[in-house]
Image: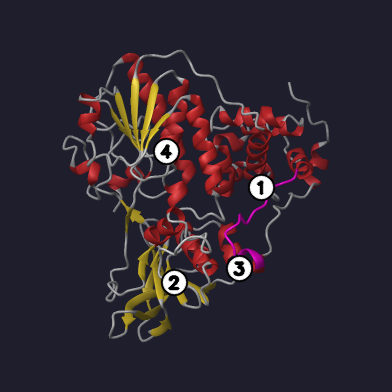
Amino acid sequence: MPEKNTLPLKERMKIARMPMPEQEPGVRNKNFTEVNLGLEAAAALTEATRCIACAKPGCVVDCPVGVKINQVVALIYAGDYLAAAAKLREDNALPAITGRVCPQENQCEGGCVLGKKGAPVAIGNLERFVADFERKSGQLGLPKNDPPTGKSVAIVGSGPAGLSAAGDLIQKGHRVRVFEALHELGGVLVYGIPEFRLPKSIVKGEVDNLRRMGVEFETNVVVGKSVTIDELMQEEHYDAVFVATGAGLPQFMGVPGEHLNGVYSANEFLTRINLMRAYLKEEYDEPVYDCRDREVIVVGGGNTAMDAVRTAKRLGARKATLVYRRSEAEMPARAEEVKHAREEGIEFQMLTAPVELLGDEKGWLTGMRCIRMELGEPGADGRRRPVAVQGSEFVLPANVVIAGLGTTANPLIQSTTPDLKTNKRNYIVADPETMKTSKRGVFAGGDIVTGGATVILAMGAGRKAARSIHAYLTSGEWEAAAAPTAAETAS
């Protein structure tokens, strides 16, 4: 048992939350090195001391993958960092990743009692600390696998949902093979999140850990084209398939001029930079239209838009501007990312929407015509709807415009699997608790079911799918129709 914290509760509650060390804004906005530098051991110990050891820890309840956070923090307080990392891995296959990109403020930290009167325990920072400590020590606390069952599972997609499911299923003794369409493993973790937030080496390390556990990986396999779901099951004899392809079809603005040179989706922009190494601009030919000394506008208010505009700044943009049709209070991006962007010199045009993209006679982008917005009555989602202010149009100069408006479902797997039920927006219909689809033996989870969400929610779906797949492989039982998802019933 770890050493118990005997410091009186009142004394613990007086301790200030330990700040995360960061690169200076004027330095980091010119490089792709990680912004957050990680806690030192002394700071981690102090932060763990703040935990008041609730009888009913809300942090555990609010964690989508069910990490035993209270036990992890207790082990950190006792100085047993390797045991803390091993405890993390019991429920989280990717702790070094979630410690960096998970929106803890809305989940585990949101359930922390200390947050009701002050700052919650910095659970995400502690998670990153122990995961990094474990990696640097070389002493991995990987969980043991059960004896082989003789059953095999194909996982389509190596993003957070697929990797999380793979980690749980391999522990149950099943053979697990992950198929990835791209040439690098990690899905959105490698193509969608920039190096300064999540280094590629961290993703590779977590994938390698799964490989050490016995998970098999195959890249450059486009399921639905290279091989179909039916072929995986009938010809390659997989007993179950988990579809975790994410939602990678980009959405555009729907305004005139989107055909002009210099217009990207954030999905394409970030993928080119991450997978084609544009962030190593001194070593690789730049696979994107040169941002140096140019005016760059990113449209959107989520984390992807924030990633794109901060990336453009690092690529040398003279001016990098975020255009968002609501106010900053409505932005879905993490508060930390907004704070970092402002510090790095990103300009914000709130309550602004694009009307038209303007270009020259050679087809190159020159500007964006915008209109001011005001917030009207709340819509079905509870958010106030933006309404155009007539007569308020103006033009922002722009050489590059990036649409960071989210993504929708890629239809490839659905179109080649006719007995796989989809909704009106082409997302796969799956039971929200079991992840079962309309096709026997096929499960689906993550963004391909719910639409775009967070890494940790996708991982939660992967864990649910793994439990359900294991139950199916063990019992052979398959209930009838899958229940509709929120994505199916939403307007």
* Residue under numbered circle 1: 115
- Labels 1 & 3 near each other (Cβ < 8 A): no
Which residue is at a point 24% across and 47% down the rendered structure image? 411
Q: CA distance from mark 1 to mark 2?
A: 44 Å
Residue 412, numbered label: none
Q: Mark 1: which secondary structure?
A: helix
Disc 1 versus disc 3: nearer the observer? 3
Residue at the farthest left position: 418
Q: Residues within 10 Å of mark 2 (few under 14, many from 20)?
A: some
Identity, as a three-letter code, of the amino acid under mark 2: Asp
Image x and y of residue 204, in percent: 51, 41
* Residue under numbered circle 2: 290
Q: Per the image, is 227 magenta?
A: no
Identity, as a three-letter code, of the amino acid under mark 4: Ala
Residue 161, numbered label: 4
Considering only order in the chain, which callout, 2 or 1, is on the residue closer to the N terminus? 1
